[in-house]
Image: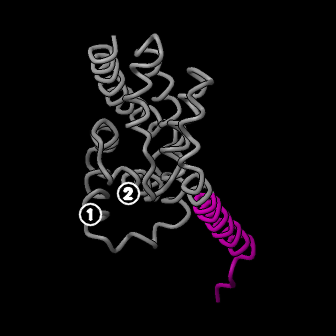
Amino acid sequence: MNEPNPSLAKNRKTFYLWRLLALLFVLALSLYIFSIREDAAKLAILGYPGVFLIAFMAYATVILPAPGLAIIFTLGGVLSNPLGVAIAASLGATAGEISGYLAGFGGQVVVERLDIYQKLTQWMQTHGGVTVYVLSAIPNPFFDLAGMAAGALKMPLHIFLFWCFLGQTTKMLIFSFLGSGFLSRFFQ
């Protein structure tokens, strides 16, 4: 007769504890950032590090909306180097997207029954990094779900971050340079 392996049971409890802690961390971070969203624009006085912090806060929220792209558009015209704005914003947004990845690792049961989540999971399984790139390069409300799918599928974090950074850089370059051209045209 097979007796249960006590170390396996302990590892499973530890695994579920880490998943629960990751989910609680993401929820607390999202609620905090959502509560201070009006104050985020004040970080622009910090220059490019402020851009990083704004993007991080805007993209660290899971599902809750934050006005990150509007601020990046504006700062592309306010700060002297829209390329610098785009790179700082891409780094901040990519770091912020770790929260969606952790939410997938920690609580995929919350969204796994949504049809769009099922589609994203299928795309992630067949086209992994490309799916992350495309969904992070276009403004859409589904990237949090893509990050969750990547975490739930145990996509290596460094692969997720690489493709996410490429997609975020594409998007931030467009918004930063559009903001630079738009604002300089009207406020010369």
Could you tell whether 147 is left or right of 139 in the image?
A: right
Q: Which residue is mark 1?
A: 116
Which residue occupies 40% across, 16% down? 82
Tell me if residue 26 is in the magenta stretch: yes
Left or right placement of residue 55 versus residue 4 in this view: left
Q: Quadrant of residue 163?
A: top left
Image location of residue 171, percent across then percent down? 32, 31
> Residue 161 at what x, y percent from top left?
47, 36
Label 2: which residue? 145
Where the C terminus falls, by quadrant? top left
Give me the residue at 32% from left, 19% from top: 177
Instruction: Answer left or right for 74 relative to 178.
Output: right
Q: Nearer the viewer, residue 48 or 152?
A: 48
Taking the magenta stretch, the answer to whether it contains residue 185 is no
Separation of marks 1 and 2 at Cα, in angstroms? 8 Å
Write the residue at 36% across / 49% down.
143
Which residue lies at the image location 32% right of the left edge and 53% below the top edge? 141
Residue situated in front as seen by the camera: 32 or 166: 32
Question: For the residue carrying disc 1, how many other residues have a C-alpha within 10 Å: few (<14), some (14-19), or many (20+)?
Answer: some
Task: Magenta stretch: give its range.
Answer: 1-28
Say whether residue 16 is left or right of residue 72: right
CB contact under 8 Å: marks 1 and 2: yes
Q: 122 or 87: nearer the eye?
A: 87
Residue 36 place in picture, x, y as percent? 59, 51
